[in-house]
């Protein structure tokens, strides 16, 4: 059995930042990720990030992953890759992990930060299981990490940031994007992203959804249809599109199975992406010693994921008595950062969700 | 107020643009930046990378309002804008031509002297332009900047190029 002070589950921006922060405080940290490489979603993000310089704005996602990995190397953190945390033994406070294909390892930590990220949502329509229909994030991984294009002509479903960015990256890879559609009446992602795809000639069609997909064994086309303001299809507005690929980018759900298992109190908060754990200001869940950070806590951004990770990591170490003398400053700075990031109109949804979560938790 | 068109289609209309078009006196003095960033988002590199203090933010969600007394079109902000929303307009490149400098993250890159198709905000061809500069240094970090000639009255229309291969 492996023993450590702070276990971090998930090595995306949240987990990496948590590991760095806890190690800085002086704790012994073990970072676990099921992938072969640390970085989480960042590894496939070839676009420049928003935010501010403190969170590496204007730097491309994969470069941010490299910066964080370099920072991690400077600290004495144990890293277990290719290791999936599959369960929690509540009575002993032990995590069960699968290492590689056939090895089972146990991990006992005094504190744990769960930073497992999120998974993509799918959409219901006839033939939505035809080969050629992918999650947009999956296509991004395929293209940007493995160098494989998914097809020749794509319909993107979802005009949030992920749909817009993956469309742009498909174009960069030489793939035609027939259209980006979204059932909402307005574009959900940042308008600057929308404008940069639009000026490549890609139509963005709001108030449209997929009626059905068709094809003989593989995707050959899709029928899209306009919806009214109650999201009901308007008869007679159907349109067929010849496509060999469809990308679904209709949102993410926090990956919280481990938190359920651990007995953390959970709430369903749509603004935060679905079922999320109740947590306090230090990102500690209702189970003492188990923290959460990043997309697992609520679907937001890498920028906020990093700051949350920092807060969780700092507090996990501090509550065991570790402090390099900067705990209070660092924590205060991070909490202020989060407030700043969420202070604008696009932060309203998250802020409302967090408020609702706090209210319901009482 | 962001226009319906921008919210629904991703294309800024006149009412949006009115807020960001540089005043005539600014366009007369030389190259200047135009930031087509109409939404309050948590983002501020345009401000932090401008070393002339032409874009000042109090909150990270502020919109970039360019102080044309200070902006000299130096281009430092353009390749650092993750929204690729900043363009440099030089209204008086020649007697009848202006230039538009735009971020361009596609291959193949055009070369200086090439003639390319100019596109508007919908990606529709609107003419031809000559590439007068390609800036692709380490600072640009894979966001090359292309300067292309356009008729003077197209300086606020052309926002993209197509390189014919
Ligand atoms: C297309 C796209 C574009 C984006 N663009 C931006 C942007 O411009 N700016 C921005 O700020 N954000 C952006 N984001 C959002 C950002 O990527 C995420 O918010 C961020 O990565 C969340 O970080 P995280 O650490 O919580 O999760 P992730 O990055 O998802 O990392 C989770 C990690 O946990 C590991 N893991 C999961 N379960 C287990 C388990 N059981 N055992 C072991 N390991 C496990 C995974 O392998 C993964 O490495 C974008 C996202 C996408 C998909
Ligand atoms: S072009 Fe130069 S001076 Fe003008 S806003 Fe950008 S960085 Fe500042
Ligand atoms: S850097 Fe670009 S996207 Fe960010 S605020 Fe400035 S102009 Fe807008």
Image (spheres, coloured by chain):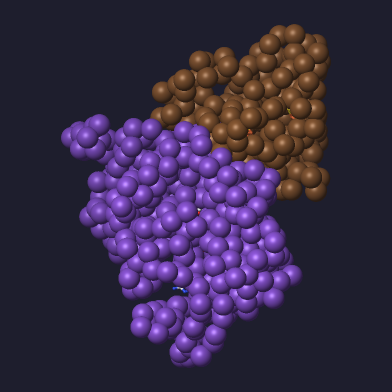
Left or right position of B150 against A101? right
Q: Determine whether A61 is above or below B105 in the image.
A: below
Q: Residue at x 50, y 27 (%)?
A: B11
Residue B138 versus residue A278: which sits nearer the camera?
A278
Q: Quadrant of residue A226?
A: top left
Q: Residue at x 72, y 48 (%)?
A: B142
Q: Determine whether A202 is above or below A360 in the image.
A: above
Residue A9 versus residue B10: which sits nearer the camera?
A9
Most distant residue in the top direction:
B25
Q: Residue at x 70, y 40 (%)?
A: B80
Residue A19 visible in the snapshot: no
Spot occupied by residue A163 in the image (x, y as percentages of width and height): 45, 47
Q: Quadrant of residue B24?
A: top right
Most distant residue in the left direction:
A235
Q: Determine whether B61 is above or below B14 in the image.
A: below
Q: Quadrant of residue A43?
A: bottom right
Spot occupied by residue A45 in the image (x, y as percentages of width and height): 58, 55
State the brown chain.
Answer: B
Left or right position of B11 against B141? left
Per the rendering, the colour in which chain A appears is purple
Spot occupied by residue B20 in the image (x, y as percentages of width and height): 61, 19
């Amino acid at each position: 059995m492996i023993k450590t002070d702070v276990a971090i589950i998930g090595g995306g921006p949240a987990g990496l930042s948590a590991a760095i922060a806890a190690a800085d405080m002086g704790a012994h940290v073990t970072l676990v990720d099921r992938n072969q490489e640390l970085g989480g979603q960042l590894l496939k993000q070839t676009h420049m990030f928003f935010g501010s310089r403190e969170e590496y704005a204007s730097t491309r996602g994969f470069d941010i992953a490299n910066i964080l990995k370099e920072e991690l190397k400077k600290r004495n953190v144990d890293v277990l890759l290719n290791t999936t945390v599959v369960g929690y033994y509540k009575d002993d406070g032990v995590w069960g992990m699968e290492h590689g294909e056939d090895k089972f390892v146990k991990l006992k930590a005094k504190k744990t930060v769960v930073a497992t990220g999120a998974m993509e949502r799918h959409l219901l329509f006839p033939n939505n299981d035809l080969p050629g229909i992918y999650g947009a994030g999956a296509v991004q991984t395929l293209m940007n990490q493995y160098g494989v294009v998914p097809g020749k002509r794509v319909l993107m479903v979802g005009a949030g940031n992920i749909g817009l960015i993956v469309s742009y990256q498909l174009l960069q890879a030489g793939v035609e994007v027939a259209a980006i559609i979204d059932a909402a009446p307005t574009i959900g992602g940042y308008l600057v992203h929308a404008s940069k795809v639009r000026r490549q000639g890609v139509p963005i069609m709001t108030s449209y959804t997929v009626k059905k997909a068709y094809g003989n064994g593989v995707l050959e086309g899709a029928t899209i249809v306009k919806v009214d303001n109650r999201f009901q299809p308007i008869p007679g507005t159907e349109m067929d599109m010849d496509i060999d690929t469809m990308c679904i980018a209709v949102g993410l759900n926090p990956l919280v199975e481990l938190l359920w298992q651990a007995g953390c109190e959970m709430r369903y908060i749509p603004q935060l992406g679905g079922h999320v754990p109740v947590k306090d200001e230090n990102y500690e869940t209702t189970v003492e010693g188990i923290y959460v950070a990043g997309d697992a806590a609520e679907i937001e951004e890498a920028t906020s994921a990093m700051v949350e990770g920092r807060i969780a990591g700092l507090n996990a170490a501090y509550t065991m008595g570790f402090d390099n003398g900067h705990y209070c400053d660092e924590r205060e700075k991070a909490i202020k950062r989060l407030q700043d990031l969420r202070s604008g109109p696009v932060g309203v949804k998250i802020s409302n969700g967090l408020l609702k979560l706090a209210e319901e938790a009482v | 107020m962001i226009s319906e068109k921008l919210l629904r289609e991703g294309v800024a209309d006149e009412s949006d643009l009115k807020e960001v078009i540089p005043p005539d006196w600014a366009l007369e003095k030389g190259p200047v930046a135009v930031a087509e960033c109409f939404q309050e988002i948590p983002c501020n590199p345009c401000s932090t990378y401008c070393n002339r203090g032409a874009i000042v933010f109090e909150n990270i969600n502020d919109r970039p309002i360019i102080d044309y007394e200070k902006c000299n079109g130096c281009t430092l902000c353009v390749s650092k804008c993750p929204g690729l929303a900043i363009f440099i307009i030089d209204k008086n490149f020649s007697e009848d031509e202006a230039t538009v400098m735009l971020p361009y993250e596609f291959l193949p890159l055009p070369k200086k002297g090439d003639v390319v198709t100019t596109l508007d905000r919908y990606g529709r061809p609107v003419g031809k332009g000559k590439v007068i500069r390609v800036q692709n240094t380490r600072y640009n970090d894979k966001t090359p900047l292309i300067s292309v000639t356009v008729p003077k009255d197209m300086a606020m229309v052309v926002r993209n190029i197509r390189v014919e291969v």
